Amino acid sequence: MLEDRTTAASSATEWPAAYPKGYAVVDVETTGLARHDRIISAAVYRLDARGEVEDHWYTLVNPERDPGPVWIHGLTNDVLEGAPLFTDIAEEFSSRLDGRVLVAHNAVFDWQMIAREYARAEREAPVRQRLCTIALSKELGLPLPNHKLETLAAHFGVVQQRAHHALDDARVLAEAFRPSLRAAATGGVRLPLHECRPLTEWSDVPAPRIGQQAGPGGYGSYRQTSWRPARKRPACPYPNPGRYEDGKPLKQGMRIAFSGDTSIERDLLEDRATEAGLHVATSISRLTSLLVTNDPDSGTSKVVKARQFGTPVVDEAAFGQLLRDVEPATAP
C-alpha cells in the first residue's frame, strides 16, 4: 500500500529539474569501523529520478582477514571463504554506481569504505556525489526521536526483516528514501548533496588482531584534515556517573571526548553520542569518562592529558559497539 501511494503521489509531483537523474542506494557490511577494515558484503538498489526501484544487486566479499563482529552481521569465516575478492566484483559494483548519486544512511562511512576498497584495487569508484539520508531527514524536519535506520523505516511504515544484512538494509533504505525524496520535491527542499573525492593512493599493511588499535598513522592510513568549526550542542540533562569501566556499558551522562580522525564523520559520531544521552566534551579533564581515538599513541593534547588523568581510552570501533547499549541514567 505504501508503494502504491508513493507511486501515485510521485507522478503528481512537479519534479525539480535540478534533482539528480538517478540514485544508487548502497549498504555495506564491514569487518569494523576503522580505516584498515574491509567490506564483507555490499548491496545496491538502483533508483530512477523519482526514487522508483529499477533493480537490485547483492554480493558477499572475501575480506582476506578476520570478519570482525560476527554477532552483528552474521558473516563467518566459513561463509566468506569462497566469496569473491573485492577486485573480482569491482567492475560490477562500478556499473551499479556509475552516473548516479550514492545514497546511504550515514553516507560518508559507506563512501569512505568503498573508496578505500577501490584504492586498494588501484581503481577509482565512479561516484561524484553522495546523499546521506540522516542529513535529508534533518532537512525535512522529520519528527524522529533518533536517526537510526530502523527509526526512519518505522516512520514511513517500512518493515525491516534482517537488520545488518546489506541487502535488506539497502531495501529498507530505498523504500524510506522514496517518500523522503517525494517530500523534498513537494516542499522545494534542496537535497543535501556532497562531493565524493576518490582516494588515489593507498598504503596497506596486515590487519591488526581483534580489539587492537591502530598505531601512529593507522593501518592503511591516508591524510585527512582534522580541523572542524566549533559546534554548540544542547546541555546534557543527566549527571556525570563517573568514568567508564572496561567490560561495562556506557551510562547516560558520561563525558565523552574525541581525538584525531574518525571513519564516521565526526559530527555524526557526536550526534549519536548526544542522542544516546552522553555528554560530548571538547576537552579532557579529571571528570572525563572516556576518550575515543583511533591513534592512542599520538602526542595530541587530549591523549597526553588522558594519560595524565588516567582517563580510559577506546577506539572508534569499540565505541560504536558501546553506543548500541547505553545504560539509562539513574536520575534526570
Image: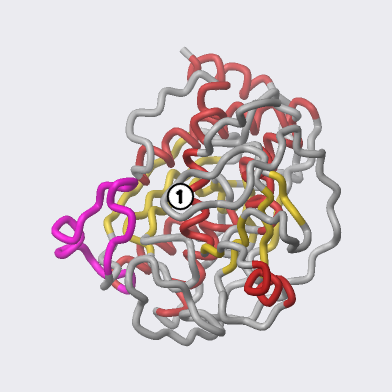
In the structure shown, which secondary structural element does the residue marked by tag 1 occupy?
helix
Q: Which residue occupies the foreground of this view, 232 or 137?
A: 232
User: What residue is disc 1 on?
Assistant: 321
- Please, what is the three-letter code of the amino acid marked with disc 1? Gln
Q: Which residue occupies the foreground of this view, 109 or 111?
A: 109
Residue bounds of the magenta highlight: 66-87
Q: Residue at x 67, y 40 (%)?
A: 253
Query: Where residue 166 sits in the image (x, y, percent)?
Result: 37, 46
Q: Is residue 229 magenta?
A: no
Residue 296 falls in image quadrant? bottom right
The answer to whether residue 295 is above or below residue 32 is below
Query: Where residue 155 sits in the image (x, y, percent)?
Result: 57, 21
User: How many badges with numbers are in the image?
Assistant: 1
Give neighbour class at mark 1: few <14, some 14-19, many 20+ (Cα, 10 Å). Answer: some
Q: Which residue occupies the foreground of this view, 21 or 205?
A: 205
The answer to whether residue 64 is above or below residue 141 is below
Quadrant placement of the C terminus? top right
Q: Residue at x 55, y 21 (%)?
A: 156
In the shown orientation, is residue 74 left or right of residue 242?
left
Query: Where residue 261 sits in the image (x, y, percent)?
Result: 64, 70
